[in-house]
Image (cartoon, rainbow, N blue to C red):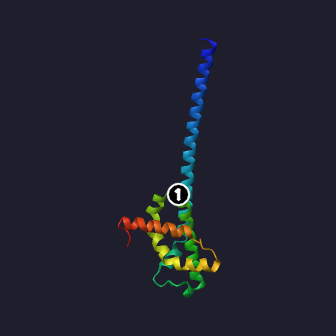
Amino acid sequence: MDADEILALGTLVLAGATGSLVLATLCQLRLTRKALELDGLSRVIDEVDRVHAQRDAVLAPGFPADPNRASPDQIEQARVVTNAMNRLAYLVQKDLLREKLVRDLYAESMVITWDKVQEYVKSDRQRRGAPRRAAHFEKQAERFRRWLSKEGLLR
């Protein structure tokens, strides 16, 4: 084997090693993204579960539809539930959580909750001068509403 053949063989081995390193790096990035996605989903589920009792109170038949007739505690309950749903929707819209996964878990809940709190959100938007308050929640609830309707799952 002459020097040119040895150099060619060395270059080929180096290229193979580099290719393997690139492949290993891509696999690691994919696993890291999956781990981050699962961690994010876990945190959001924990948050949604923490506000579950408040969500139930907001969805209860006696909860005022008009925020002007609500007590400060009821307004706070609506705000807490809205913030949790808005964070969940934000993560979906930024592709940090898969929409299908969140849809399977929360589509109906998000639509029903939005229907109940939207007047509170509109009132809060005006009061704070924040027209985009809970915009992610609103947009995601409407997307889920269309999907549920198309699938014949909307009550």
Extreme-top residue of the structure: 1
User: How many numbered tags mark residues here?
Assistant: 1
Residue type indicated by callout 1: Leu
Res. 71 visible in picture: yes
> Residue tagged by mark 1?
97
Q: Quadrant of the N terminus?
A: top right
Query: Residue 4, located in which quarter of the rendered image?
Result: top right
Q: Is residue 6 above or below residue 85?
A: above
Query: Residue 16, located in which quarter of the rendered image?
Result: top right
**Residue 108, image x and y in percent?**
43, 69
Q: Is residue 13 above or below residue 97?
A: above
In front: 71, or 65?
Answer: 65
Q: Is residue 105 above or below residue 1?
A: below
Q: Quadrant of the C terminus?
A: bottom left
Q: Residue at x 54, y 41 (%)?
A: 27
Q: Residue at x 45, y 66 (%)?
A: 144
The residue carrying pointer 1 sits among few (fewer than 14), some (14 to 19) or many (20 or more) residues within 10 Å by Cα, namely: many
Extreme-bottom residue of the structure: 69
Query: Residue 86, located in which quarter of the rendered image?
Result: bottom right
Res. 49 visible in picture: no
**Residue 127, image x and y in percent?**
63, 80
Q: Residue at x 54, y 54 (%)?
A: 37
Extreme-left residue of the structure: 152
Q: Residue at x 57, y 65 (%)?
A: 87
Circle 1 SS class: loop
**Residue 31, image x and y in percent?**
55, 46
**Residue 107, image x and y in percent?**
45, 66
